[in-house]
Image (cartoon, rainbow, N blue to C red):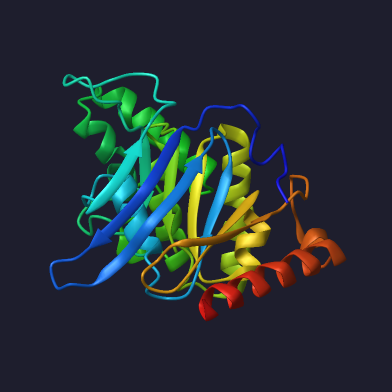
Amino acid sequence: MVNSASKPSGLRPLVSVRGLSKKFSNGTLALRDVDLDLFPGEFVSLLGPSGCGKSTLLRLISDLSAPSAGTIDWPGAESADAYGKPEHSLGFVFQEPTLLPWAPTLENVTLPLRLKHMNAGEARDRAAAMLDLVGLKGFEKSYPRELSGGMKMRVSIARALVTEPKVLLMDEPFAALDEITRHKLNDDLLALWERNRFTAVFVTHSVFESVYLSQRVVVMAARPGRVMSEVMVDAPFPRDNLFRTSADYAHLCRLGSEALKAAIDA
């Protein structure tokens, strides 16, 4: 089933992946013939078993790794770099917060702006505003060692979003957190997405998390990773605990579980 609100008909993709494969130097074929379109402003989850290449796919999209075959195009890019290549406007949130341990929160968030040579005062103002949005106002001078796991992940999200990217890639950012914190961060992430309407690509092992967050759940098979099916989640936003306990949510989670089982058995 395709939901026109989730996968707009006739809209040019922001990112287009075609025939993508990745074989590592040790001979492991991580991905094979992956086709995937990402549209402006949509929230997509990549769901699949461990080792199916979800994280590898994010690294390829972000240019942190090179594909063995296939292409990754940015037909929706609005500008080009000095070499004429489309500029990849993206942020990346890794599984671990990867914060600078010697730097306070505000400096961690200003880092990507400083790398872009932004005026120091403007960078601090933008970083402070982003910390406010992620619920960390008042923690600007705190060091990573003074923050909880959930707070450190909020800093990581703020750092990824402070450059106002068109695409936000998230590699299981909440997997190590307790359920209460995870639910809260899911809600806050959706609020940020609805506010800024970046294209979100979220890697998870959780059917429940993928359905709650997404408009579209892309289900991947075990190694070599490939796209097996998609589950369209046409539930409206904003979403809350009423949705989590609804019959519609349970039905969509069942569809996701069935699609995941079929992918694992493929």
Residue lying at 65% horizontally and 31% vertically, measured from the top left: 9
Q: Between residues 250 and 138, which one lies in front from this camera angle?
A: 250
Q: Position of residue 129 (x, y in %)?
A: 46, 34
**In the picture, residue 53 is in which quadrant?**
bottom left
Farthest residue, direction bottom: 265
Q: Is residue 48 left or right of residue 245?
A: left
- For the residue pair 43 and 176, the one nearer the viewer reads as 43
Asked if 135 appears above or below 167 in the picture, the reply is below
Rendering coords of residue 101 (x, y %): 23, 59
Task: Name, please, the residue furthest toward the left.
Answer: 25
Residue drawn at 62 percent across, 48 percent down: 190
Give the residue at x 43% y 62%. 226
At which x and y percent is residue 98? 28, 59
Q: Position of residue 166 (x, y in %)?
A: 44, 33
145 or 247, which is in the foreground? Answer: 247
Please give the name of the residue rendered at 23% of the width and 51% of the height, measured from the top-left corner: 103
Q: Quadrant of residue 95?
A: bottom left
